[in-house]
Amino acid sequence: MNKKVKNLVFSGVQPSGNLHLGNYLGAMRNFVELQKKMDCVYSIVDLHAITVFQDPKKLEKSIMETVSSFIACGLDFKKSIIFNQSSVSAHAELAWIFNCVSRLGWLNRMTQFKEKAGSNRENASVGLYVYPNLMAADILLYKATHVPVGDDQKQHLELCRDIANKFNNDFNNSEFFPLPEPLIQKNFSRVMSLRDGKKKMSKSEDSDFSRINLQDSEDDIEKKIKKAKTDSHLITANKKDLENRPEALNLLNIYSSVTKTSLETTLKEMEGKDFSKFKKKLADALIASICPIGKKIKELNKDKHQLLTILRDGTEKAKVIADKNLKEIKQIVGFI
């Protein structure tokens, strides 16, 4: 039972439908690289999605579009396990066990709940409050050793480690759950809104001009980049000049990420140019990178049967691991 587990990556993506550039650069492209080096389990976390109300028809459509986005971005469903979370009931079962392991004080410190619940916390769902316990169950159900995280999820992964450690200590089984390590992308800057360089790029923002969607056309991308907020200053090679220029920094960071170059290299290349010329290069780079993905997504969306087959195959593979581990967990807890 305490055998050393091999390295395994787990990550979940909420089914938000049409994914955007921030999702691609911040997660999907990294997922593709990780599957070349390690065993990977990638889940469309639909249980997390319903912490706020979802229209059932839109949710189903969003799940399917997220699968097609996974595949179009380069995830190999024959190499990595790809499935929707709700199809493996062990996630919910382990989440309840962790609800009884996790402490109220731990959850009260979670800043994301405070941000998402807003001022009307009493009207937030219980699911939104205990969401981090379910996230811990997602990871530990597969005894994942590594989790790709951004800045906004570091606190949740720390909670996951606390839960794993407490479970191991409570049941005198010090090596049962590994303490998962964060995988943080090197030389990566968060993708911000095209309309406000201080806000993260998000589908929830009202203006579609705030983001580049993976299914945007060439014309869409050109228009959005042309209208993207920036300033009238020329580009310099000095990074310090960008400290109080969030929109300019965002566009330069996006170009660097898309072209897989450092910000320093980008600044040297663009030194002395104004943003009208730079925006043309940025749009061209985005079109070359994003439009083939968008075309593939649209093709995949037409074949619902194929997408369901990918999910069902992934569910069967996930269940083999999840059911085995949950059986051991139940024995440890004392369930008959």
Image (spheres, grey):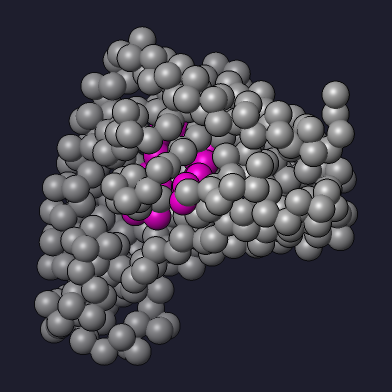
Of residues 316 and 210, which is closer to you in this image? 316
Q: Is residue 20 visible?
A: yes
Asked if residue 177 lies in the magenta stretch, the reply is no
Q: Which residues are magenta?
A: 7-26
Q: Is residue 172 left or right of residue 184?
A: right
Specify whether 143 is left or right of 108: left
- Looking at the image, the residue that sits furthest to the top is 305
Please tell me whether residue 246 is drawn above or below residue 143 in the rendered image: below
- Which residue is at the front of the view, 226 or 278? 278
Residue occupying the point 67% across, 58% down: 161
**Residue 15 shown in magenta:** yes
Question: What number of labels is visible?
Answer: 0
Q: Residue 149 location in percent, x, y?
A: 51, 57
Q: Report the side of 234 relative to 86 (left or right).
A: left
In depth, the one of 78 and 189 nearer the eye is: 78
For the question of whether residue 124 can be seen, the reply is no
Residue 287 in percent (x, y) is at 17, 47
Q: Which residue is drawn at the image coordinates 13% and 53% (left, top)?
A: 284
